[in-house]
Structures are given as C-alpha cells and as structure tokens.
Image: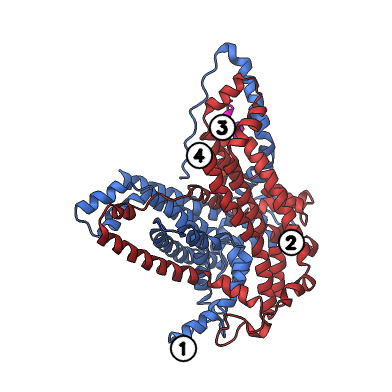
Chain colours: A blue, B red
C-alpha cells in the first residue's frame, strides 16, 4: 500500500515542442512552489541537517565543531541510552503483536453484512482519533493503584495483589502498552477489514467444497490472502512503536525513574531540553536507522516469501 | 507533526462505504431454511458478542463522562459508581473560570483552521503539478517528498527547533503553522487521488482553451472533493490533537492549546479528578462532532463521484 508506482517518464519532447516543455516546467513549478518552499525549509533541510549535526559537537553555549564519531561513542557509553533503547524495544514487543492480533480478530468479527455493523466499526475506530491527552489522563485514572476501576476489577476477580501500574517501575510499561493497544487497534482493524474484503469469495467456496473446516479456511485461505495487508500492518506498527513519544510523555513522562523512558523522549530531553544539539542528533540517527532497517528487513522477508 | 502518515491511510477503507458481502453470508443465503434459521441464530450471537465488546471498549469514555459529572471525592470510590448519585452539572460551568478553557479552545481552533486551509490548498496545488503537468525533474522531486515521509519527525525535531529559535519564532503560533502546514503527506495523498482522474479529462479541458490553473480549479478540484474532505478532516483532527508540537514551541499560557491546557491542569491540580474529566470531555467533543460529520461526508463523496481513493 505504501509502495509507490511512479508514472512513466515524461514522453520525450520533440524539438518543435521545446518551448512547450519550458512552459510546462514553469507551470509545473508554480503549482508545486507554494508547498515546496515550506517543505524545503521546514522538512527537507532539517532532515539533512539532522544527519550532519550528528557528527558535530554543538550546544546552546558553544559553536558547532566537527567531531566525527565522538557523539556516537558517548552515546554507546551512556547508560540512559541503553535504558531508553531497551524500553523502546520492550514497548514494541508488547505493542506490535497485541495490536495486530486484536485488530485482526476485530476485523474478522466485523467483516460481515449486518445491520448497524458500521456503528460498531466507527465506535472501535474512535479511540484512535481521540485526543491523546484525554486518553492518557483517563487511563491514568483507570490505572490508579488504590481505588482505580481496573484494580477494583482485578480484586473482584480474585487478584488480591493488584499491580501498581504507572506508579510501579515494573508495571508502568504494561500500562502504557495496554493504553496504546486500546487506542491503535481500531485503526489497524480498518486496514485488515480492507484486506479481508479484497479476498475473493471463490477461494472460500473452493475450500468448503474440499471439505475444509472453519479453522482450516482461516489458516489456509484467510491468512495467506492477507499477507500483503499483514506486511503493511507490521511495518506500520513497528515503525510507529519505535517512534512512540507523546503517549509516554503525557502518561508517565518516562517514569517512574527511567522505567518508561524511550528514544524519542531522550532526543527531546538532550536536544531541546538541554541544548545538546549534536549529541541528540546522533540518537536521532540511530532511531532513523532502526526504523529504516526494520522497513527494509520486512520488505526483504516479504519478497522471499512471495518467491 | 504527529503520525500523519499512518492516519491518512485510514481513509481508503472508510471511503468504500458499504462493505463487500462477507463470504459466509453470500454462501448461506443460497441455502434452505434450516441454514437460514442457523444464520439468524449466528447473527444474534454475533450481535451479542459485538455489543459486549463495544461496551467494554467504550468503558473509558463512559467513565470519563460519568466522572465529569461527579464531585472529586466520588470519582475513585469503592465500589465504582457508574452513574453519579448527584449530577454535578456545575463542573461544566466552573471549568471556564478555573482555567482559561475558552482561550485554549480558541487557540486550538485557530491553529487547526489555518494549518488545515494551508495544507489542503498547497497540497492539492502541488499534487496537480506532480500528477498532471509533465516536466523534467518532477519524479525525482516527488521521490524526495516520499523519502521524508519515511523519516520519523522526532529525528529532525531538533534542527527544526534550532531553526525556529534563530528565526525568533519559538513561543508563537507561526512556528507551528510553518512546520505543519506544508506536510509531504498531504501532497502524497492528493497526488494518489489525482492519479485516478483520467488525463483525458484534462486534455479535453486544454483543447477547450482552459489554462492549467483553470483545469485545476474547475475540473480537478470539483472531482476531488472526497479526497479534499478526508485530507482536511485528518489535518484538522491531527492539529487539534497534537501535543508534542505545542509542547515544544508554546511556552506562554495565553498561547496554549486545549491539549497543553488540559495537561497542565492535571499537573497542577491532580486531585481534582472530576474537573480533569470535565476538561477531557470538552477537549474530545469537537473531535467527536467532526468525526461524525466527516464520516457521512466521505460516504456521500464516494456515492456521488463513484471513485475510490
């Protein structure tokens, strides 16, 4: 779905049309320019600058100076970096499979023609576009360790020692993961629904003629047919997991201690909070490379499977 | 600034309106009555499962609404009070004086409207250039656009911040407008849509003597209403909900958006549970309204134009 098919290269222009070609270039640029100026100044240049900055020593108090790999050496020796990296990976390991499984389950359940099914879809999708601050605030209260509704529920089903959730360094991350899964699954459910609706009915009919059970049909028709969707969902989910930022900032602000500090937050703290522009850019580069290599790796796996 | 890329992808399935018949249904309708009776039973079971599921998933919203109408000391009670014993409607009148909620709402609205207008306008213009005008270097440029979508914005937020600091734009709306109004994803989405509009339409208009700007305004724009609507809706919702952008750039209270105001209220008065929930409800209502309206618009747009995004 993300892969892009570019239009065929412009038709070669004959000599008589050169004037026309120049006019087209001019016209084309006038259309693109209003957006391009903003894009160039506030996206493209910062992206390039981020790469360059990671090899420089530059703070709010000192002039920029080329230092090669020094920032990266410092980063690898920094305890906080490893903690943040570990937390980010833990978050991804929880967020990706849970969201995927629930999104697929919901999509299977909602992929039928029933009156009012649209309402259910919309309701499940709604958390995704609800403002994150409201979501974080509500869940923080739901997770409240003493009299919070979640712990009351856990007590009611016989769990006497309910976890401390966001006030405990062991349970803060699971609390964040639960909240983010609740928030995101509706979105991925919609992607899976689109995938399910693209599966030809004939495949199921053929499978039934062959005497396949419901489970066998799911395993041998649905899952293979959904592979392109699944690939897309996994890439999007993993990438967004590694970018997790605002939810953590609002819900736990990285705490308690450093229990939920993630990479994005570290970039913010070092770069904007403390003005270590060069050092924070080195962490940015690592984040970018992780995201990039996940995407490339999954592309490769997908290609191999198709062969 | 937030995860725009992920969000816009959501529009396609929504656009498809009525779903394709589920395979099992079509098969069953061709069978005799025992099957049909079985189908009805399954339907009832499915409705039951769905209802329970949706109620469970909506609990946080319900709890938010119910708590917003309670006294502070009634919010975290044992056992949970699902429906307030006394409805404290005054929370909804008091909040406006407790925090400058109206100012926050105005700021959010201002930012969301300006950014949405700029994004939709520049995005659809650029998309026309990228899809309907042929000139050398066009595709390379477009690749640069796509390339940056793949870079997480957290990776370049520091250079952006340095830039804004040097321009003297930190602590102003202008910083956020400049950073968010020219997103690459708006261009990408609109271009994808324009690619589905046949070039012959433009050719015909050209022969009729319309200029390229005329074609954009009179042929392409009217045809792309659904895509324009979804881009506008998603940009608006994203800007409204954005926390990190305002958090980084807006320091003075009078510039704060709803999200910042709500977060700071929680930080200052963390025991005022009920009022915090009241603020949350107020911050969500505009999104709910826009979402419900937009939902209908998407489906109508598709029904009238007959095209899928």
Mark 3 vs 4, N-terminal side: 3
CA distance separating discs 4 and 1: 57 Å
Q: Are both tags, 2 and 3, on one chain?
A: yes
The residue depicted at 51 percent of the width and 35 percent of the height is: B196
Q: Which residue is mark 2?
A: B105
Q: Which mark is residue A160?
A: 1
The crowding category of the residue bearing disc 1, from other C-alpha atoms within 10 Å (few below 14, some 14 to 19, many at least 20), is: few
Pointers 3 and 4 in contact (CB under 8 A)?
Answer: no
CA distance separating discs 2 and 3: 38 Å
x then y, percent, for residue A280: 62, 57
Q: Which mark is residue B200?
A: none
Q: Label 4: state its secondary structure.
A: loop
CA distance separating discs 3 and 4: 20 Å
Q: Are both tags, 1 and 3, on one chain?
A: no
Within the magenta stretch, is there residue B299? no
Pointers 1 and 3 in contact (CB under 8 A)?
Answer: no
Pointers 2 and 3 in contact (CB under 8 A)?
Answer: no
**Which chain letter goes with mark 3?**
B
Instruction: Give the mark toward the camera: 1 or 2.
Output: 2
What residue span does the magenta drawing correspond to? B127-134
Q: Label 1: state its secondary structure.
A: loop
Question: Looking at this rendering, what residue extends furthest in the front direction?
Answer: B33
Residue toward you, A124 or B145? A124
CA distance separating discs 1 and 2: 43 Å
């Amino acid at each position: 779905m993300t892969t892009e098919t570019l239009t065929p290269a412009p038709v070669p222009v004959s000599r008589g049309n050169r004037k026309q070609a120049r006019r087209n270039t001019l016209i084309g640029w006038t259309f693109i320019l209003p957006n391009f100026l903003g894009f160039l100044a506030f996206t493209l240049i910062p992206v390039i600058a981020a790469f360059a900055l990671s090899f420089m020593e530059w703070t709010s108090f000192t002039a920029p100076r080329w230092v090669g790999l020094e920032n990266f050496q410092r980063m690898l020796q920094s305890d906080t970096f490893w903690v943040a990296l570990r937390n980010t990976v833990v978050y991804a390991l929880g967020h990706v499979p849970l969201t995927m499984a629930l999104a697929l389950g919901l999509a299977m359940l909602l992929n039928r023609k029933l009156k009012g099914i649209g309402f259910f879809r919309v309701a499940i999708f709604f958390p995704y576009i609800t403002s994150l601050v409201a979501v974080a605030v509500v869940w923080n209260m739901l997770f409240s360790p003493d009299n919070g509704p979640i712990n009351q529920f856990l007590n009611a089903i016989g769990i006497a020692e309910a976890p401390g959730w966001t006030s405990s360094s062991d349970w803060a991350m699971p609390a964040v993961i639960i909240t983010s899964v609740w928030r995101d699954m509706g979105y991925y459910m919609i992607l899976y629904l689109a995938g399910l609706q693209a599966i030809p009915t004939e495949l199921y009919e053929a499978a039934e003629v062959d005497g396949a059970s419901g489970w066998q049909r799911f395993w041998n028709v649905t899952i293979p047919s959904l592979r392109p969707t699944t690939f897309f969902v996994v890439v999007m989910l993993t990438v967004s997991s590694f970018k997790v930022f605002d939810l953590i900032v609002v819900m736990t602000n990285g705490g308690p201690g450093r229990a939920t500090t993630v990479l994005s937050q570290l970039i913010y703290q070092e770069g904007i909070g403390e003005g270590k522009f060069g050092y924070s850019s080195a962490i940015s580069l690592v984040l970018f490379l992780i995201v990039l290599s996940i995407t490339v790796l999954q592309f490769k796996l997908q290609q191999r499977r198709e062969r | 600034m937030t995860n725009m890329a992920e969000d816009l992808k959501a529009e396609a399935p929504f656009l498809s309106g009525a779903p394709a018949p589920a395979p099992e249904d079509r098969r069953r309708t061709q069978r005799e009555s025992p099957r049909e009776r079985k189908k009805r039973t399954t339907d009832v079971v499915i409705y039951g499962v769905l209802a329970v599921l949706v109620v469970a998933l909506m609990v946080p919203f319900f709890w938010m609404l119910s708590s917003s109408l309670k006294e502070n000391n009634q919010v975290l009670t044992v056992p949970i009070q699902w429906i307030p014993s006394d409805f404290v409607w005054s929370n909804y009148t008091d909040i406006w004086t407790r925090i400058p909620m109206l100012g926050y709402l105005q700021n959010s609205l201002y930012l969301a409207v300006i950014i949405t207008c700029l994004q939709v306008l520049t995005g659809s213009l650029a998309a026309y250039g990228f899809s309907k005008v042929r000139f050398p270097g066009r595709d390379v440029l477009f690749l640069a656009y796509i390339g940056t979508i793949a870079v997480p914005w957290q990776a370049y937020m520091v250079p952006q911040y340095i830039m804004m600091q040097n321009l003297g734009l930190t602590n102003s709306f202008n910083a956020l407008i400049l950073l968010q109004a020219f997103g690459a994803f708006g261009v990408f989405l609109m271009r994808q849509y324009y690619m589905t509009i046949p070039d012959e339409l433009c050719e015909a208009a050209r022969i009729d003597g319309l200029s390229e700007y005329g074609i954009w305004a009179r042929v392409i724009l009217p045809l792309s209403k659904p895509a324009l609507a979804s881009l506008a809706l998603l940009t608006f919702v994203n800007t409204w909900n954005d926390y990190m952008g305002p958090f980084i750039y807006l320091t003075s209270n009078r510039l704060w958006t709803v999200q910042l105001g709500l977060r700071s209220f929680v930080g200052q008065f963390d025991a005022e549970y009920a009022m915090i929930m009241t603020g949350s409800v107020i911050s969500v209502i505009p999104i709910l309204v826009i979402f419900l309206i937009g939902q209908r618009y998407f489906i109508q747009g598709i029904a009238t134009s007959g095209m899928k995004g």
